[in-house]
Amino acid sequence: MRTEGVSEGMGDYSRFISPAYLIASGEFDCDISNPFVHPLHRHETYSELLFIEEGRGTFVIDNQSHETGPGAILLYQRGVWHEEMSTHYPFRATYFAFKGLQLKGIPQDYFLSPEQRPVIELGEKGNEILKLVRECHAELHSDAAESNAASNHLFGLLLVRLARHVSGGFMERGSVKPSEAAVMKARSYIEENYRQPITLDLLAKVTFVSKYYLSHLFLQEVGMSTIQYLIRCRIEAAKRYLAMTRRPMKEIGELVGYQSETTFHNIFKKVTGHTPGQYRELNEDPQNSFLNN
């Protein structure tokens, strides 16, 4: 349901056209022996919000590196490349994956405009937001009646509070079909773990559906097989590394999941029509080598 949210009262003008609904949430409690690390990736169908409760980290979002800590929210908006690494411990954080959000004047599933800094420093508002984050996460994972409705309402309130902070409805999670949820979970897993060996059997375990059914659903929803999607994610990440860094070809191949430089070279050429070296010559940007470390 789409609502303009406009009334006659002072202060009732709203930028929210359609509310977000939650797909997933999770908590991270990490120490130096088990750091919070997610290599370069992006999500094509949804956005994520990460709230840091304790510790600090380095977060690269759309080429820009951000060092931040407790009371910070990071927005990984749909389609935006990002990389995460904790640096100070203990590190505690909560994330929410969401879609359906539409605000006036910015792309679907974006909370901030592309020009805005994707980090919100909450300052003294941190404790207030933390309470909402914890309650929203608990409701999403609860078996209590109306927990889906409660979690989406709380997440909507969270976004409204953040909108107030930056500038100064409701959709049931059950509206996601089980088949759509399985495909989204598989896509998300591939997008975040493309550098690891990923098989259809593994994705079936992750999504809790049979591999044959998942294969059918994925092809129907995405238009390609899980293996084709894995290759696509790897090659897109490789393009990013080639254009933005001077890392050796063998290292880039390993970063995106290919232990053999020859295999990486052959697959890259088959997909793009260029060798990795040719692609780098055509596309490298010496002003933006943010991943050279």
Image: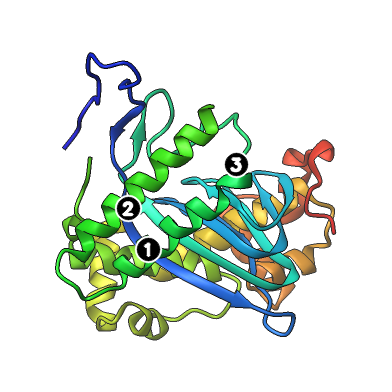
The disc, 1 or 2, on the residue closer to the chain's N-terminal end is 1
Q: Residue at x 32, y 16 (%)?
A: 10
- The residue lying at 45 percent from left, 69 percent from top is 26
Q: Is residue 290 left or right of residue 26?
A: right
Quarter of the rendering occupied by the C terminus: bottom right
On residue 118, the disc is 3
272 on left or right of 225? right
Q: Amino acid at mark 3?
A: Pro
At mark 3, the secondary structure is loop
Rendered view: 94 above or below 152:
below
Q: Is residue 269 left or right of residue 78?
A: right
Amino acid bearing label 1 = Glu
Q: Quadrant of the N terminus?
A: top left
Q: CB atoms at circles 1 and 2 under 8 Å apart?
A: yes
Q: How many marks?
A: 3
Label 2, on which residue? 154
Cα–Cα span, label 1 and label 3: 24 Å
Are the residues at dot 3 and dot 2 in contact (C-beta closer than 8 Å)? no
Measuring from the top left, give residue 193's x and y in whole percent.
54, 71
Q: Which mark is residue 135?
A: 1
| Amino acid type at mark 2 | Leu
Residue 100, quarter of the rendered image: top left
Q: Mark 1: which secondary structure?
A: helix
Give percent across and percent down for residue 266: 64, 65
Observer-side mark, 1 or 3, equals 1
Q: Residues within 10 Å of mark 1 (few under 14, many from 20)?
A: some
Q: Quadrant of residue 285?
A: top right
Label 3 or label 2, whichever lies nearer to me, is: 2
Q: Residues within 10 Å of mark 3 (few under 14, many from 20)?
A: many
Q: Is residue 40 visible?
A: yes
